Amino acid sequence: MLSLILRDSRRAWSGGGAVFPVAFFLLACILFPFGIGPDRVLLARIGGGVIWAAALLAALLPVERLVSPDADAGVFDQIAVRGCSMVEVAGAKIVAHWLSFGPPLMLAAVIAAGLLGIDAATLGAIELGLLIGTPGLAALAVATSALVAGLRGASSVAGLVMLPLAVPLLIFGAGSIEGGAGALKLLGAVTLLLVAGAPFLAAAAIRVGRE
C-alpha cells in the first residue's frame, strides 16, 4: 500500500498532475472577478462558493490519468498475481491523489481568498471545509477514472459522471462557510460515504476492465 501511494504521488508531481489542478484553480479564481466586477462586498459574499466550484473543477483535471495508464500497462494484472486486492489498490490511489492535490489546493485557497477579498474568519471556514471535503473529491475522482478507463473520449465522459455526483460536496462545502457545524457534519458524512464506497466501485470497474 505504501509503495503504491509513494509511486502514484511521485508520478503526479513529476508529470504535472499536481501542478495543473492548482494552476487551473488559481486561474479560475483570478478570472472570476473580471466577470463579476470590482464590487469587493459581492466578491467576498460569493467567494467561498467560487473557491469550492473551482476546487471541484480542478479535481476533475487529472481524472483520465489516475487509472488508465496502469490499466494499459498491465500493472493491475501484476498486482493481482501478487495477491493484492483491487480494493486496496483503489484505496492507495485515493490517498495518493488526495496528497497530490488536496494540500496544495488548500494552500492555493489562501491566495484565492486574497484575490476575492475574503476575510480571515471566512478563510478559516473554507480551509476546514476543504480539509473535510477534498478526500471525498479524491475518492470520487478515482472511482470515476476507473469507470471511464479505456473509453474513447474518457475525459468528456468523466465530467458527465463526476460532476453530478459531486454536487452534494459542493452544496455542503459552500454551505459550511456560513452553516456552521451542521453543514460540516453533512459534508463529513458525504465524504465518509464516498471514501468508504469508492474503493469498492473502483475495484469492480478495474476487474471488469481486466476481463
Image (spheres, helix red, strand yellow):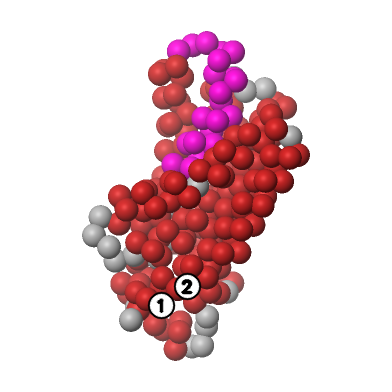
Magenta run includes residue 124: no
Q: What is the three-letter code of the residue carrying label 2? A: Ala
Cα–Cα span, label 1 and label 2: 6 Å
Q: Which residues are magenta?
A: 37-59
Q: Which residue is mark 2?
A: 203
Q: Of the numbered discs in the image, which one, if any, rests on residue 2? A: none
Tell me what residue is drawn at x 49 percent, y 88 percent. 82
Q: Is residue 125 above or below residue 4?
A: above
Pinpoint residue 136: horizontal percent, then vertical percent.
57, 53
Residue lying furthest left: 152
Q: What is the three-letter code of the residue carrying label 1? A: Arg
Pinpoint residue 120: horizontal percent, then vertical percent.
70, 26
Magenta run includes residue 47: yes
Disc 2, SS: helix
Q: Which residue is mark 1?
A: 207
Tell me what residue is drawn at x 35 percent, y 79 percent. 210
Quick one: label 1, few (<14), some, or many (20+) residues within 10 Å? some
